[in-house]
Structure formats: structure tokens, C-alpha cells
Amino acid sequence: MTPTLVRHHRYADSSAPVDAGTRARDWAEIQERMLAPLYEAVYERLEVGAGTRMLSLGCGSGLALLIAASRGARVTGVDSDRERLALARERLAPGEGPDTGLGSPAPRARLVEGVSAATPEGAPYNLLTAFQPIGCAAGDSEGLAPALASAVPLAVRGATVVLAGWGPPERCATAPVLQVAARLTGSSRAPRPVSGWRPALRDDLEEVAARAGLKPDGSGRVSCPFGYADVDSAVRGLLSTGLFDAAIRATDRSQVEKEVAEALHPHLRPDGTVWMPNVFRYLVCVA
């Protein structure tokens, strides 16, 4: 699967409050596909297929699960966002998996809200993934090590674990756009500290692996361009990531939308599309 420009999204008032369901759909329809090259590169390297029993932490609306399931893997997804999980269930409805020979197709995926509910049905997992990229916001990896520590006991000894992160800022055209969040948050008179953008560090993934007791066993970099049909789609997609939440709380959504749109101007092409080359990094570990 190659990255594609998403279709136009038109709204009556782009500055109106966005409910959780709309935001989740923005993620599923606009932003999630930008990381498809990362998922596919990892699955190709690990030869994900019929023998794979995968547990995906932070599975979002299920695109990474869908790609793995299409390769024959049995997949379970965990996410705390109920709206995204609901969309994942629509994508991965029971009865759409491979034929079991028992008269009905197998469920393609299990989707649960917490690791505690992800106990494997049958053999333990042999692949754990955490594809939600870390390394662009202060504190964005704090919850990952504990989640991995809870998930590893559900896997076989020596299972493969994959972590993902943003690449070097100089290789990520989106980095200056993300800095809008830090600038707006830092310029506010917020009553308490809030996290903001920071440049990805070389050992971000290795530090998480060490805290979770994992042994690194290789890494890779993948080109994941962010392509949008227009500026409106780009703004909605980027805001759906949650990376601008602190800025919205510190100022207001209209202000954040306006400044993100301005930051996107250098990446606007003559036909009105937006194109930002990025590099993401993944780390393969052994549990």
C-alpha cells in the first residue's frame, strides 16, 4: 500500500466544536493511513502471516490490524479510545476472516479497551506491536513501558516486540508544523504545565525498551509522507492525532486551526494539495 492523498472534507464551520466521534472519524479517514508504509515494512521484515498471533497496543481504528489480518495473522487490538475502537469494529467485523472449515469464517480480530482484557484465546501471542509513534511530544512515552510490561506476560517467551517513533526532525517536514502546538501552549498562561512538542531523540525507542525489560534486535527507517487533498483535510487530520490538544486547551481551537494552516503553507502545492515527506523509525525487540 502506498500513501495516497485523501479526499476533500467539507464542513459548514471548521471552527465549530468537534465531538469525539467526528474526531475519531477524521483519524480513520484522513490521518491513520499515513503510517501504512510503516506497518507494511514491519510486517514484510517479520514475515507476518498465518502463524502470527499479534497483540497491537494503541490500535486506533484498526488499519494496522486490517493489514496484518489480510496477511493471515490472528490479531487482537487494544485502545483506550472507544470511538476509534468502534470504527475498528466496523472495519474488522466478525465473520470476515478466513474460512475455518467449520462452516463459518473466523473472526478477523478481537478489540478490547485494556491489556487486562486481552488474554489470548488459545496460544499466547508471538508478536506485540506499539505503532503509535513516540518522540515528538514531551512525556509521550511515559505510559508505553508499563503497557508493555503488562502485555509481555501474555506472549510466548522470546516473542517479538515492535516499537515505533518519529525520525530525526531534519528528516520530518511535519516537525515545524507540530512546533505550533508547543509555541501556543508555551505562550499561554496555563495554570499548570502541559506537554508540548520536542525533537525526537536518537535513543527514545531504546530507552522505552530498556524500561520494559526488552532486548533490542534490529531497527529500520521508513518513509511515510503525509499527503492531503487540501489544507482543510490536513488541519483536521493533524488535529485528530491529539498532538494539539494542549494548545487547544491553552488557547482555542480556532486559533490552533489558523496557525496550523499557516504553518502548512510551505508544503502547499500548486494544485492545492499538501505534501510533507517524513521518516519514521521502528525498533524490533525480543521479550
Image (cartoon, grey):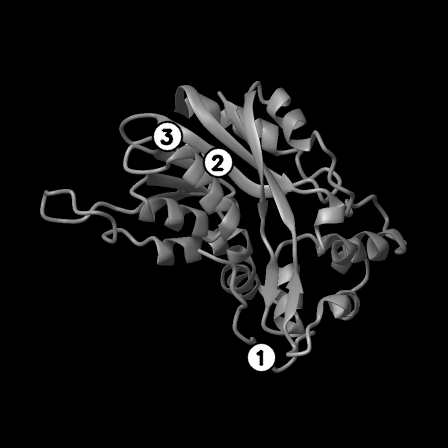
Q: Position of residue 185 (x, y in %)?
A: 83, 53
Disc 2 to disc 1: CB gap under 8 Å: no
Q: CA distance from mark 3 to mark 1?
A: 42 Å
Q: CA distance from mark 2 to mark 1?
A: 34 Å
Splitting the image into 4 quarters, where does residue 233 fall?
bottom right
Splitting the image into 4 quarters, where does residue 177 fall?
bottom right
Q: Within 10 angstroms of label 3, few (less than 14), some, or many (20 or more) residues?
A: some
Amino acid carrying mark 3 in the image:
Thr
Q: Which residue is mark 1?
A: 10
Q: Is residue 61 visible?
A: yes
Amino acid carrying mark 2 in the image:
Thr
Q: Which residue is mark 3?
A: 119
Amino acid carrying mark 1 in the image:
Arg
Numbered mark located on residue 129 in the image: 2
> Residue 286 or 25: which is nearer the viewer?
286
Disc 3 to disc 1: CB gap under 8 Å: no
Relative to 242, residue 235 above or below: below
